Image (cartoon, helix red, strand yellow):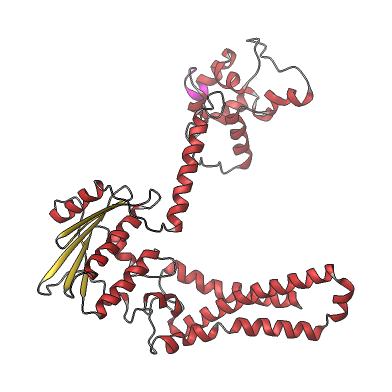
Amino acid sequence: MFIMSLAVADLTVGLVVMPISSAYVLTGRWRFGLVVCQFWLSADYSASTASILNLLVLSLDRYWSISKPLEYLRRRSKKRALVVITFVWIGSFLWIVPIIGWHKFFGDGIRKQPPDVCEANYFNAATKTSHTSDDWVLRSARTLGSQFPNLTSGSYDPVIGATCINSTLSFQLHPSCSIFTAEITAILHAFSEISSGPPDNYIIYSDSLSALESMTSLNRFSHPLTFNILELHDRLTTKGFTILFCWIPSHVGISGNELADNLARSATNSLNSPVPVNDVKKYVKSILHSKWQAQWDLKNTNKLQSIKHLIDCWPSLPIRKLDTVLTRLRIGHTRFTHRHLLLGEPAPLCTACQCQMTVLHILIECQQFNHQRIRCFHSSSITLKDILHKDPHPQLFTFLRMLGFYSLI
């Protein structure tokens, strides 16, 4: 019965939730209306939670059946199983209450999402916004009387610079911070400087279009500092501040923007701020790749290193057999050249050159195959890198078949 309940939950996710979710992801906008949105969210949350709880109950059932078989089997019955499954589904269906009624309890009866977005209302509770993002992100700066300009910039290194009213700021961020984090941090600090002044009209200029656009499409995957900016913006708006955003092109001679860029490049003071998880992941991945590359550069005697100097992903061939043959040639280990190590036999020798048979000797060095090399590669002086690199020579496998070496690899 527990397995049947689990199957119903998973089928609901697969047959109801996933098709609608796929259409939402592919189009990038919600096109099915509010009723379908609430039904989709309710089905997604309820069925997913029921699936997890069913797995928990099923695991406990298996555990007790093994650890206390006699005692548990006496107590287990269909009636008790039905009671447990009923509680599982009732608990899962409780998601429907906040999905449908959150804005009625905590949002004065007003939904926060625009019509082309389908998300639960409580994802936006942290921003405490009472109007849509289009109301406060203005794509063109209009005249409001006396306005104070604030220009921000993030450099190619994790540093920020900003000119705020009559003051300037520049900080170094942690090396793991991305350029986007530097840009969004500069905007946040511009807000902090504005908050210390009197209520008035302000404009924040930024040359990062991606940072400004990120604040118009807020979702659960948005940068964490974006939420801080939105919260601070709403708090200042309630105090009488009017703050506009304006994008300006970079490196076109705008004096304030050039000053912010110069401040970012010359920053010396460090800013102790949290680093987003995604930035940390990319930073750790970059460090590990650099250390791996440094170790790989020391492997001068490695056969593959002579062909592949950089650690990166090379494309696979569409035919599995050909890809296996190519990989064995690149690492220099084939059945013909290394089978003797397993069988305890002498290494195979080239009858023409009286030297040990290796992949390098067969493909490049042996003189008796020069005619085939010229015919396939149009040259007798080639290297392994020429024919086994990222994009192997198109005549490589033809050459191997002409030598009779293909079937021995």
Q: Is residue 56 above or below residue 392?
A: below
Q: Nearer the viewer, residue 269 or 20?
A: 269
Tell me, yes or no, if residue 69 can be seen here. yes
Could you tell whether 246 is left or right of 87 in the image? left
Point 44% across, 77% down: residue: 118
Give the percent coordinates (x, y) of residue 71: 88, 76
Give the percent coordinates (x, y) of residue 164: 19, 61
> Is residue 13 in the magenta section?
no
Point 76% across, 78% down: residue: 1
Point 20% across, 53% down: residue: 260
Point 16% across, 73% down: residue: 201
Give the percent coordinates (x, y) of residue 24: 46, 71
The image quadrant that residue 341 belongs to is: top right
Could you tell whether 207 is left or right of 6 in the image? left
Could you tell whether 213 is left or right of 35 in the image? left
Give the percent coordinates (x, y) of residue 186: 28, 59
Magenta region? 375-380
